[in-house]
Amino acid sequence: MRFKKLWAAMAAGLLAMSVGATEFRASDIQPEDYPTVLAIKFMGERLKALSGGKHSIRVYPSGSLGGEKETIEQTKIGALAMVRVNVGAMNNVCSETIVPTMPFLFRSKEHMHKVLDGAVGDEILKACEKQGLVGLAFYDSGARSIFTAKKPVRSFADMKGMKVRVQQSDLWVSMLEAMGANATPMPMGEVYTGLKTSLIDAAENNYPTYESSRAFEVAKYFSKTEHSMAPEIVLFSKRSFDKLSPQEQAWIRQAAKESVPYMRRLWAEREAQSLALVKAGGAEIIEIDKAPFQAAMRPVYDKFITDAKLKDLVKRVQDTQ
Ligand code: BDP
């Protein structure tokens, strides 16, 4: 009798778990009004509508739950349901994410969209699963360029010996080293202070992050190298995902996909706004000859695009018209 009761209680508990409403926790290092944060909120609203009010998402912005490296780990073990990071933060975790991070790979925003919306994009998202992360979508992140505190970079030669902050990724270290710089990996949250205290001379990013991190206040020379278009990636904990029904999983995937065009609109607006803001704040936007930067990236391809799988992915990106 006692066992029967216990069993009934357990079954009821399981049932409650599967029918109970869930608020999935998502982490982002960007501030509240940043396009990535707004896009995940939008995804949450879509998920709520699709699930008839059952599931929702709560975004924790500004790195309040930790940096990208730590929150990826938390998501892997299921302590966090979701995380939005740059693909750079995934380079050492899942090698396929190296492909969209590669320097001067995408020829334009349109080229990038075509690749990421197609089979290559899907394969890269899927590849994260073996690391316990379900890849749901890519978001725009524009092109990344170098910004410096004291000495402006007006030519490739100016990169020599410069201490440049990079994302915590071996690929990023190699890229900046190939430019002649002294690459310093550190979390995004330490960049502003690093520049201010001269721990680093420079960093690299897109206009919106140059603006949102206030880096333009301490590093006013922005040299348009546009060396990488590494996109953002939205990841769900496979541990948490596997506990959901196929229907629930489909809602999550759909909500994520629906947030992509919304994010692209926000991104285009924000890029223009951020550029205007940093200029008004005293930033000098420097046009620079990209050819020597591009030429210097050859050894980086030789070092990182070695196995057949990555070679095939890169070739398919290059062949995409
Ligand atoms: C920004 C991304 C953010 C990365 C950051 C970085 O939005 O996810 O953490 O770059 O450089 O553009 O670390």
Image: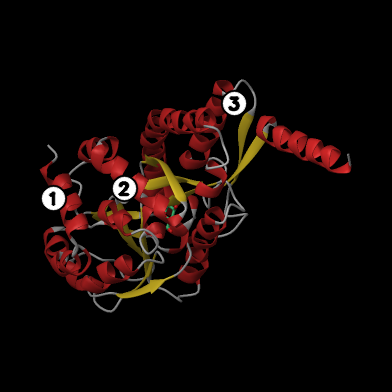
Q: Which amino acid, mark 3?
A: Lys
> Does the image show residue 35?
yes
Mark before the other along the chain sequence, 2 or 3: 3
Q: Which mark is residue 315?
A: 1
Residue 21 position, x and y percent, is 68, 31
Task: Please give the name of the residue rendered at 38% of the width and 29% of the height, measured from the top-left corner.
Answer: 261
Question: Where on the picture, by quarter, is residue 32?
Answer: top right
The image shows residue 28, relative to residue 88, as above or below, that is above
Separation (CA) of disc 1 from disc 3 = 39 Å
Quadrant placement of the N terminus: top right
Q: Secondary structure at mark 2?
A: helix
Residue 226 position, x and y percent, is 25, 53
Task: Please give the name of the residue rendered at 28% of the width and 69% of the height, measured from the top-left corner.
Answer: 176
Mark before the other along the chain sequence, 1 or 3: 3
Q: Which residue is mark 3?
A: 48
The answer to whether residue 51 is left or right of residue 173 is right
Task: Please give the name of the residue rendered at 17% of the width and 46% of the height, measured from the top-left corner.
Answer: 317
The colour scheme used to paint the residues is secondary structure
